[in-house]
Amino acid sequence: MDKKATTRKDDYSKWYNDLVHNADLAEHSDVKGCMVIKPYGYAIWENMRDVLDKMFKDTGHSNAYFPLFIPKSYLSKEASHVEGFAKECAVVTHYRLRATADGKGVEVDPDAKLQEELIVRPTSETIIWNSYRNWIQSYRDLPILINQWANVVRWEMRTRLFLRTAEFLWQEGHTAHATKEEAIAETEQMLRVYADFAENYMAMPVILGRKTHSERFAGADDTLCIEAMMQDGKALQAGTSHFLGQNFAKAFEVKFADKSGKLDYVWATSWGVSTRLMGALVMTHSDDEGLVLPPKLAPIQVVAVPIYKTEEEFHRIEEKFMALGKELKAKGIRFKFDGDDNKRPGWKFNEYEVKGVPIRLAMGPRDLENGMVELARRDTKEKSSISFETALATVEQLLLDIQSNLLERSKLHRANNTFEVDTYEEFKQRIDEGGFFLAHWDGTEATEELVKNETKATIRCIPFTEHPVPGKCMVTGQPSAQRVIFAKAY
């Protein structure tokens, strides 16, 4: 398989597609708009999922599962919700096929039409709140803190692996609370969990903020988000947390009796991240040679490649590496010894470079005699020769260093590509260069839409800040409470 990818400078979009293919992460399915996540790609997603799952459980949440199919009438109960998702919904109308008259194929059985059509879930607020209606009677039943890991379908016409597909994997949290304040605190808490994960596991710096009214989740009173900058300067929304107010409780008549016996509607949140994070991981760190993975999420953190001519040499090197591997695994480090004799060491070096393995070790007969091992780190491509006796400690520390370096490198990239602009003319001249543009906005949807139509840039978020600095809108000159982030986005 050809592992040579297009360079980022030549064609960033093609570079991304080539890399996803060459690193064996995913491929397009015969089902239009859908993807097959291959074992190596799924192993990365599993690492993400496992970390996030623990973070959710550490904050008091439990996992559950709700149906894939949603009665169409449920979706229409919350007006803004149905309006937001109507154009993306896949609809099930029949439940059976039958053989065609010529016996050579199948067709929909017209006698098997569903009494009520079913929506393949684009998100689960409606089906979940229908269940919550049966679970909640009193303040004693609250809060409900539930997450589900699932697949959803949003019928996308223009797709890109991981970033935008008709079906994707995600988690969606759905919580119910007795007070508005508690629900808002939950919304903010889960955004911080996402930011923690993005920065400390993905090594991807993010900006926390609030979406504008027009960019809110359909059916939410408020949407909070984390925004990341990719290497081409475009923004990627990496996670959202929604304060739903009492909208879904009112739509599904979910009331509870407080301590005084008074009935009130329940307060709600929902929050989620998806396999889109896989695309973010690729685009944040990778280079023209292939994938670059932060050690905390890499399926293989250390790979060892023997270099030998005779079977005796192989077994002596294997013995040394397996002993080191046992020590590494005891420290929780994911280690692989590649003893495949069908592939040459040079092929293996290239393979693991493309797949982004953080540390590669190699040993030949001379290294063995001298008690040395060659070490290559993926993030900087630096090579060194280290004592085999110190390999365990060196590898342990280097994994931490690589994780830290990737985050700092990404922070520097973002800092170098974040600009303050004060005039619309300057904004229009520079927006195609990529980056985050901090500009004043008058708070109106009309101005937001004008900028979007004329430049294809959107307000990514209104960043949280303790000291907002007022000014004048770059477009209208009207008063602005603070600068917001404009950028082109995925």
Image (cartoon, grey):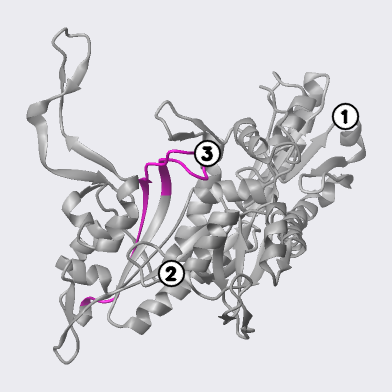
**How far across and how far down the image is residue 30, in percent?**
42, 25
Give the residue type at disc 3.
Leu
Q: Which residues are the magenta region?
A: 141-169
Mark 2 and mark 1 lie on one chain; the one further toward the N terminus is 2
- Crowdedness near tag 1: few (<14), some (14–19) or many (≥20) residues, C-alpha within 10 Å: some
Q: Is residue 21 above or below residue 273?
A: above
- Crowdedness near tag 2: few (<14), some (14–19) or many (≥20) residues, C-alpha within 10 Å: some
Query: Which circle marks residue 150 in the picture?
Result: none
Residue bearing the label numbered 3: 161
Q: Is residue 256 above or below residue 95?
A: below
Disc number lying in front (2 or 1): 2
Displayed quadrant of residue 413: bottom right
**How far across and how far down the image is residue 375, in percent?**
82, 43
Residue bearing the label numbered 2: 213
Disc number lying in front (3 or 2): 2
**How far across and how far down the image is residue 208, in percent?**
56, 70
Give the residue type at disc 2.
His
Is residue 121 visible in the rendered image? The answer is: yes
Mark 1 and mark 3 lie on one chain; the one further toward the N terminus is 3
Displayed quadrant of residue 213: bottom left
Query: Which circle marks residue 365 in the picture?
Result: 1
Nearest the viewer among 103 and 434 is: 434
- Crowdedness near tag 3: few (<14), some (14–19) or many (≥20) residues, C-alpha within 10 Å: many
Disc number lying in front (1 or 3): 3
Q: Is residue 254 above or below residue 364?
A: below
Which structural element holds mark 2?
Answer: helix
Separation of disc 1 and disc 3 at Cα?
Answer: 43 Å
